Image (cartoon, rainbow, N blue to C red):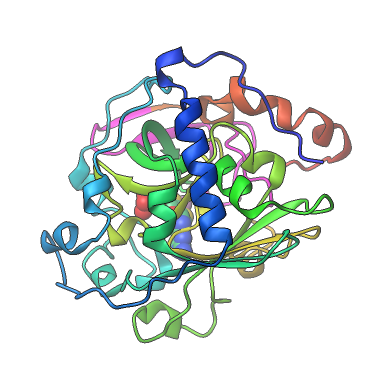
Amino acid sequence: MLTRSKPTWEMPESEATSEADFLNRRELCKTIAAGSILAAGSVPLLGVGSAQAAADPSASLYPAKRNEAYKLDREITSEKIATTYNNFYEFGSHKNIWKAAQKLETRPWTVTIDGMVEKEQKVDIDTLLKAMPLEERLYRHRCVEAWAIAVPWTGFPMEALLDLARPAAGAKYVVMETFNDKKMAPGQRQFWYPWPYVETITIEEAANELSIIGTGAYGKPMPKQNGAPLRLVVPWKYGFKQIKSIVRFTFTDKAPKSFWQKVQSKEYGFWANVNPEVDHPRWSQATEKLLGTGKRVPTQLYNGYAEQVAGLYTEIQKKEKTFF
Ligand SMILES: Nc1nc2c(c(=O)[nH]1)N[C@H]1C(S)=C(S)[C@@H](COP(=O)(O)O)O[C@H]1N2
Ligand SMILES: [Mo]
């Protein structure tokens, strides 16, 4: 059984998905499930930089309407900083990968939904994007390296993906996988890393109202360096959970080790919830640097989202001593 957590507060009526929208989405989901997918045909790749948005066949879906329910306690980080200071090891193990990441080819892009689901599916990205209810949300983002940004993401609730995938009753986890292509991504030639990047959250976490699949940022399709065309956004967790450029969602009853757990299991846990009191072996988590402001501020438990997510963990915390 899925336990879908109810928000602790209500969205204003005007922001809620209307019944009609919801039905349309169900219809589209059915169309996808019926297999009318994989509208093949390659989209010309116009290349890099500012041409990127123009070349993106989903450009007309942006900007999506902002969901005003999600408020920030800080300034939105400048687009320049959020799109030029990145972690994306597929393109290099440093922050300045944004140019290298323009090599990422995001069309054609097929998303596989498999494992413990009613019916395994392959969905073309543009069919998926049109079927999903896109909205904009202002979210904080916190890297375990103790830097933080605030980003206007566009995306769809992960709950909509659960509606599409229809996981079996025994499924407990959603495993997500990044593309694996040495030709596009020079970092993936570094054989000592366990490619492809993999991350997992529980289905209960995926059903939480905060969990979205990011498809855009700053009112435009997702920049390649930020994880186009699909990346996970779970803002109460450290950045390394927010897997980029997803090609596969697998539903299982066992969580495989994540990329970072395989690299260094002592440093990276499964839950990875932001917590000022649990230090990473190399970085104190007590405070965080707000990029672009010169300011350092105290870290908040669950990155400030305790109201929405603390309830997910009350039982687990009783059982697990080292909760990270
Ligand atoms: N596939 C993949 N996803 C990834 C990473 C990565 O190296 N590869 N880095 C993670 C880390 S550590 C962080 S902090 C965020 C950074 O997201 P941003 O560059 O959009 O700020 O992406 C996460 N997702
Ligand atoms: Mo990170």
- In the rendered view, does 314 fall on the left or right side of 61? right
Q: Residue at x 22, y 52 (%)?
A: 59
The stretch drawn in magenta includes residue 75: no
Q: Residue at x 41, y 85 (%)?
A: 182
Query: Can residue 230 be seen at all in this image of the molecule?
Result: no
Identify which residue, 126 or 8, lies in the foreground: 126
Reply above or below: 1 against 310.
below
- In the rendered view, does 186 fall on the left or right side of 59? right
Q: Residue at x 28, y 68 (%)?
A: 101
- In the rendered view, does 250 fall on the left or right side of 87? right
Query: Can residue 196 be seen at all in this image of the molecule?
Result: yes
Identify which residue, 74 or 222, lies in the foreground: 222
Reply above or below: 307 against 216.
above
Task: Work out which residue is located at the far right of the displayed protein and give it.
Answer: 319
In the image, which residues are magenta? 270-296
- In the rendered view, does 45 fall on the left or right side of 88? left
Q: Position of residue 244 (x, y in %)?
A: 44, 59
Identify which residue, 198 or 31, lies in the foreground: 31
Q: Position of residue 71 (x, y in %)?
A: 39, 20
